[in-house]
Image (cartoon, rainbow, N blue to C red):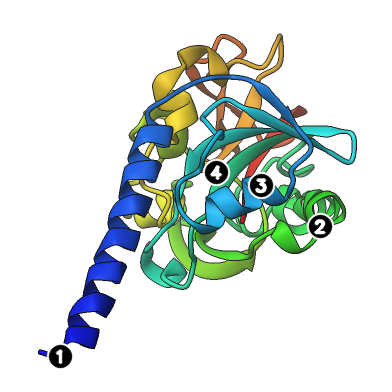
Amino acid sequence: MTISKILFDGAQYIKKSKRAEGEWIHNNTYRGLNLGTFNDTYEQAIQDGTFDNEYVGDTFTMGGHKYKIAGFNTKYGHEQNTNLGNHICLIGEFGQHVMNDDSTTQGGFAGSDMFENYLPTIENQLKADWGSHLLSFNSYLSTSVDDEGAPNNGAWFNLTACLMNSTQVYGSPTKYSNNTNGMKYNMGDENDILPLYKLKFKERKWGNMWWWLRDVYTYDAFADVNFDGSAHYDDTNYLGGVRAFFLIN
């Protein structure tokens, strides 16, 4: 083996070790500070994988909107997301909306009014606020349900934002996540709890508002997070809070 090869491999090992150390430390530390506007210093800390001065629970304010850090490299190396480099996962709050006006889960989450018509408005806001820092990623989402209301088909979608599933919030599917035909349809590749919710239970709460998850529960209901942070469900035509996750670098 040549000296140049040894030096290259050594540099790559140091780089990977540095990223893994920064990722682990920052995913296991809740701070909750307001960091103000995202700038070049924060960007560089993401690029080199140290995530210096960025911790779970911290918030950035962009375009007058507050966004909270939920975790670091949360989709790093996941299935159809192996092209993603170092990144931060952020959570935004986007008002209230129904899943479907006609009280059905027939098209799965991907066929819902929430996904088809409301999510694009969220993505537009994020593009305006974050510009080139906003990353696209792939999520596997349910596209249909069987006669009992359990999702039975799915597909990959390229997105810049998505609603969370129950595993991201609670660490595993809740009883309101109907996985009779397999967990893939509701969970996709987001199969780990976000550090934000692992470190602070109170972060599940949103004032007096409950908020939607993308897990299909029955033929006319989706899972959600109750106002007290507990797992729950509601009919698709109920007006619920909308929290979505997205990635930046």
Q: Are marks 2 and 1 in contact (CB under 8 Å)?
A: no
The secondary structure type at the circle numbered 3 is: helix
Name the residue carrying label 1: 2
Q: Nearer the viewer, residue 150 or 155?
A: 155
Q: Is residue 48 above or below residue 220?
A: below
Q: Is residue 210 above or below residue 39?
A: above
Residue 244 in sight: yes
For discs 2 and 3, the disc positioned in front in the rendered view: 3
- Give the CA separation, mark 1 to mark 4: 63 Å
- Quadrant (top left, top right, bottom left, bottom right) of the C terminus: bottom right
Which disc is residue 127 wearing? 2
Query: What amino acid is at disc 4?
Result: Tyr
For discs 2 and 1, the disc positioned in front in the rendered view: 1
For discs 2 and 4, the disc positioned in front in the rendered view: 2
The secondary structure type at the circle numbered 1 is: loop
Q: Residue furthest bottom?
A: 2
Which disc is residue 41 wearing? 3
